[in-house]
Image (cartoon, rainbow, N blue to C red):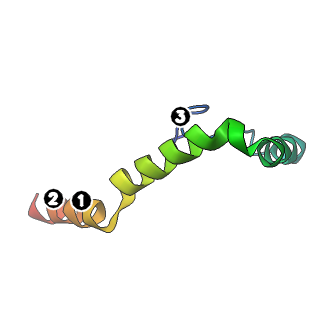
Amino acid sequence: QEVLEDGIHGLLVDFFDPQALAEQVATVLKHPDRYRDMRLHAREIVCQRYSLAAGTAGYTRLLRA
């Protein structure tokens, strides 16, 4: 919930509901084309927010504060 937006660049399911998780995984595997744009957007977000450069810049700001 802190990292992604449900339906935008990821899918959230109840952590304590393994059946819901299994069903969501099965749906994505059955219909990969339906989730293509979400996958691409997720990769873009991860590269922007969690790249080595972004992490290094964050640590530098923290140390300079």
Between residue 35 and residue 24, name the one nearer to us: 35
Query: Label 2's element?
Result: helix
Spot the residue most to the left.
64
Q: Mark 3 points at which residue?
A: 5
**Can I make out residue 39 in this image?**
yes
Can you give x and y, in whole percent of width and height, for residue 65 in the image?
11, 57
| Residues under numbered marks 2 and 3 in contact, where contact means CB atoms less than 8 Å apart | no
Q: Distance between the residues labelled 2 and 3?
A: 26 Å
What amino acid is labelled 3 in the image? Glu
Q: Name the residue under label 1.
A: 58
Residue at point 31%, 68% (across, down):
52
| Residues under numbered marks 2 and 1 in contact, where contact means CB atoms less than 8 Å apart | yes
Mark number for residue 61? 2
What amino acid is labelled 2 in the image? Arg
Instruction: State the quadrant of the N terminus.
Output: top right
What amino acid is labelled 1 in the image? Gly
Instruction: Note whether 37 is above or below 22 in the view shown.
Output: above
Count of marks, rendered view: 3
